Image (spheres, grey):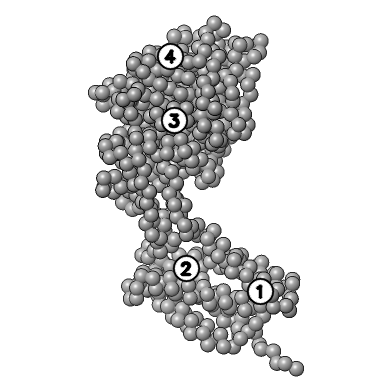
Amino acid sequence: MKKQHNPWIFISFTILTVFNLLVYFAIRAMWSGIVRYTFKAMPYYLLATIIVATLTMMALCIMKKYPKWILFIIIPINLLFLGLDAYIISLTTEATHYFIREFMYGLAFISAVSIVPILWNVIINSRRLHERWVPVVMLIVLFIVGVIWQYDICLINDINTPVVYAVEDTYQIVFTTKAKGEAWVIIDGVEYNDTFAGYRYTEEKIHKVSVPMEVLDKAKKYKIETRAMYLRGPYESLQGKTISQTYNWKGVNLNDGLDYYVLADTHNTQKTPLAAASYFGDKLDFLIAVGDHVSWVDREADLSNFLTLGGNITNGEIPVIYARGNHETKGVMADELHRYVGARDEDYYYTFRIQNIWGIVLDIGEDHADDFVEYCGTSKFDPYREQQTLFLDEVIANAENEYDAEGVEYRIAVSHIPLTVKSKNDYVANIKDAWVERLNQMNITILYSGHQHELWFIDDSFEAGSTLTQVKEYSGKDTNNSTRIMTNTNFPSILVSKRGEAQSLLDPEKVFDTGFIGLAVSVKDNETIMRYTNDHNEIVGDIRSPWFSNIVYGDEIRITNK
């Protein structure tokens, strides 16, 4: 009878090799000590060595092959790593809890990727050589896929089209990269960084870099550079090569008038809003996004949804004004939204100045009480809204540097939830009144809103306090309970978007990405001309007042600029 080798010595060294891999990776924060006495790549050569040794030993165990000769290689490798690991740990005993935590994460990972091939081998237990390789291939593939997933590694980096938001007197250049890492912007040889407290962000794929408006407007181009971060510890890191992309900057061109597009309530759609916003073609001067561009924010894809849409519309060449919608307050990642859009720190209210254009963006947040059941006790919008009331007072006190500043000729306001009308039992009615009272002092030409998924023009000539009830010509019904109460406003406002094909409520809103209406705005001489346009670049006609049968605007709405 052929003598069988005792597998337990072999299995013991396999366990020891796995142990050394997990310990070595757990102490990666201290690999800089290895670099200090060797060279920069040495920690990664050692990592590759222990990974190959681990996979080899695990594969042989799964195949039930135990060659003695390999122990002459494995034993010195394990002794090397035992000594190396013990030495590094002995120098940094205060980090023991960190090492233990990382070791347990690694143990869970190794267990997860090895259980499938082990079970395969137990169940199949084949004596055929080509079938015995199946669990080995599984092990290797699962290990590679697991590492890529666990540590979010992307070996092929790239820069996605940026969106350039206008906030106060700066442009916030926002973009994502394929790989997590650090990023910066170069304009005329000057470097602008995405930093927190003096340090570049390195563990994110989203980057926001602020640059002075006058610098970018003068330079007419900017370059984004990024470098992937594959592994980062406090004293050592493994990074990819620096890649870059240069973008032209058109900015706002007032030589041929002013043309801009306004959209809201796109709710995850891409194709039809993009088509509608292409109405002006290359003449588009800037874009206003009035919120609810997603239905809620649960994943990175939701956060970057508008970056995709805004980037495709503007190509990173013209400014974007962003207002948060109430749906963008929902979801487990809603608190990360400020990194992806234009914001003043973590707040979504601010003023902006682009050449002779001044604007203000406000954010009601949600329009229910903070104890509304859907908010699960997390909302604190009341104090947030009160902050904005104080902010409006500050803007008025600083009028000579804001809306009354030298050179300002055109003033707009943006709020996702309409401010110039109130609904019955409107929880935020007092806030709307307070804000409108203050906006009345700012010579606002027009306020843009969304939220209702309807197309309304609200004339400031409507009597304050009057009840506005939808008429049959708009709603398609003889009686309708949809009413609004007019605030005491001295400026008009307009609801800008609907996922549909016509203004009338008889045209139901589209569930999928099959129809969209936005607002194309032209400013010429002393007039603002507003036209609703669809995703076929056609002007949507038969626009009328939802509340007065005798008021019909037809193809366009014209107002005199203040």
* Residue 90 figure quarter: bottom left
Residues tagged 4 and 2 counted as in contact (Cβ below 8 A): no
Closer to the N terminus: mark 2 or mark 1? 2
Q: Is residue 232 visible?
A: no
**Residue 106: numbered disc:** none
Q: CA distance from mark 2 to mark 1?
A: 30 Å
Q: CA distance from mark 3 to mark 4?
A: 22 Å
Q: Which residue is mark 4?
A: 558
Q: Residue at x 54, y 20 (%)?
A: 540
Closer to the N terminus: mark 2 or mark 3? 2
Crowding around mark 4 (Cα neighbors within 10 Å: few <14, some 14 to 19, many 20+) is: some
Crowding around mark 3 (Cα neighbors within 10 Å: few <14, some 14 to 19, many 20+) is: few
Does 501 sit above or below residue 216?
A: above
**How far from the left and from the top, in percent, is residue 285?**
38, 29
**How far from the left and from the top, in percent, is residue 463?**
46, 8
Closer to the N terminus: mark 1 or mark 3? 1
Q: Which residue is mark 3?
A: 281
Q: CA distance from mark 1 to mark 3?
A: 58 Å
Single out the residue that lies furthest toward the bottom. 1
**Which of 211 and 392 lies nearest the eye of the viewer?**
211
Residues tagged 2 and 1 counted as in contact (Cβ below 8 A): no
Does 276 sit above or below residue 127?
A: above
Q: Is residue 401 visible?
A: yes
